[in-house]
Image (tube, rainbow, N blue to C red):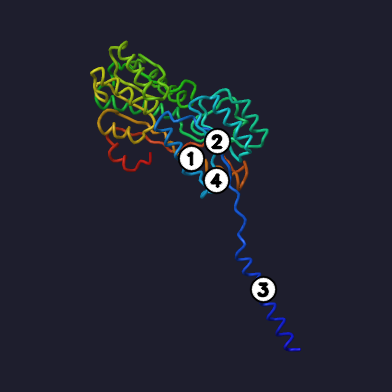
């Protein structure tokens, strides 16, 4: 009897050991990746490239995501096509950096009908507040106002606050949120100063080549220019080339204020060619990641605000050299 029991116990131990080995070899089910479709404006500027890099470095498989990226080449129709493709692929979330603010109602209704939350990055949309969850980006109106505030202080510092100041505004893509906000901030500032005059205002489409082309034309038709507001860095670089070609010194003969504050602009501030750069922080990936993870854990009620601003600063020739080593873009 004892021999039989011992045999049964031994057999049981062998079965248990085999089961344990099987369990050890059996892989745990793979965690489902969160699929995000990102409809980017394009690659029109260094800022945009940094923005794209931020998303690609954040939305990785290691971080629990599958990213489907689409470059719209600055065309709204391409973005609408991309969003419809995301819907067909049944992504979990759609992120859009809209080319312009209007014309999104139909395609966002389609996303809503499919039950896919939409998050806006960088630029905004109008008339569709109930069709997207939230927006992440810079405070463009405040950026414009910050540029004006810096100019006020600088003119006072150099003893020109009472002089007549002729100002050029190189606008971004007309209808884009960044253009609308920055233009408004600049125009408000000019209107508040009786001795400031807006002598030219034209779009450079956020590109260096167009910024140079427009500035060349303005220099030919406008004999006296004291200040250039360039609504992004790349247009400022184009304007610098045009100013040099016209035999003037950028940063000295003409004060240059721009928006974005990428690495090359810091180099140009250090070289004395740009006077001030108002930051537009492109590192939106981590903030969107935070929002999605909140949604996954708590649902839409976890999002406390529809507007999610990123932190931004103002830089000039006095602090550019010290700040450059800390910059990530």
Q: Which residue is mark 3?
A: 16
Q: Secondary structure at mark 2?
A: strand
Measure how far apart labels 3 and 1 are at the Cα level: 48 Å
Q: Which residue is located at x 58 percent, y 27 percent?
A: 80
Mark positioned earlier in the residue sequence (1 or 2): 1
Image location of residue 36, percent across then percent down: 56, 40
Left or right: residue 210 compared with residue 155: right
What residue would you read off at disc 4? Answer: 65
Q: CA distance from mark 4 to mark 3?
A: 38 Å
Residue 118 relative to residue 241: left or right: right
Name the residue carrying label 1: 55
Where in the figure is residue 58, as x and y percent of width and height? 48, 44
Residue 98 lies, in percent from the top left, at 52, 28
Residue 192, image quadrant: top left
Inter-mark Cα distance, 4 to 2: 13 Å
For residue 95, which numbered disc appears in the image?
A: 2
Residue found at the far right of this picture: 1
Quarter location, residue 168? top left
Q: For the N terminus, which image quadrant?
A: bottom right
Determine crowd level at label 3: few under 14, some 14-19, many 20+ residues with C-alpha closer than 10 A.
few
- Give the spatial CA distance, label 1 vs label 2: 10 Å
């Amino acid at each position: 009897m004892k021999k039989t029991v011992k045999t049964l116990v031994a057999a049981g131990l062998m079965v248990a050991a085999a089961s344990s080995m099987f369990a050890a070899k059996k892989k745990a089910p793979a965690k489902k990746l969160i699929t995000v479709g990102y409809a980017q404006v394009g690659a029109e500027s260094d800022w945009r490239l940094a923005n794209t890099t931020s998303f690609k470095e954040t939305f990785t498989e290691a971080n629990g995501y599958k990213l489907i990226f689409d470059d719209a080449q600055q065309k709204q129709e391409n973005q609408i096509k991309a969003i419809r493709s995301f819907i067909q692929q049944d992504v979990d979330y759609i992120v859009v950096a809209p080319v312009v603010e209007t014309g999104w109602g139909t395609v966002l209704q389609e996303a809503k009908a499919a039950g896919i939350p939409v998050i806006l990055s960088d630029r905004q949309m109008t008339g569709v507040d109930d069709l997207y969850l939230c927006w992440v980006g810079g405070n463009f109106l405040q950026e414009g106002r910050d540029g004006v505030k810096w100019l006020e202080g600088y003119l006072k510092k150099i003893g020109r606050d009472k002089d007549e100041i002729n100002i050029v505004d190189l606008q971004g893509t007309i209808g884009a949120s960044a253009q609308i906000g920055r233009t408004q901030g600049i125009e408000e500032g000019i209107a508040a100063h009786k001795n400031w005059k807006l002598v030219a205002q034209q779009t450079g489409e956020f590109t260096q080549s167009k910024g140079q082309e427009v500035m060349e034309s303005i220099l030919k038709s406008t004999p006296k220019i004291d200040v250039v507001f360039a609504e992004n860095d790349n247009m400022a670089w184009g304007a610098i080339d045009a100013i040099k070609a016209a035999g003037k010194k950028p940063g000295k003969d003409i004060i240059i204020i721009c928006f974005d504050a990428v690495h090359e602009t810091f180099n140009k501030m250090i070289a004395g060619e740009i006077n001030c750069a108002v930051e537009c922080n492109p590192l939106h990936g981590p903030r969107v990641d935070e929002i999605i993870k909140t949604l996954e854990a708590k649902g839409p009620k976890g999002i406390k605000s529809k507007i999610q601003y990123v932190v931004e600063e103002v830089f000039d020739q006095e602090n550019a050299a010290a700040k450059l080593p800390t910059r990530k873009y």
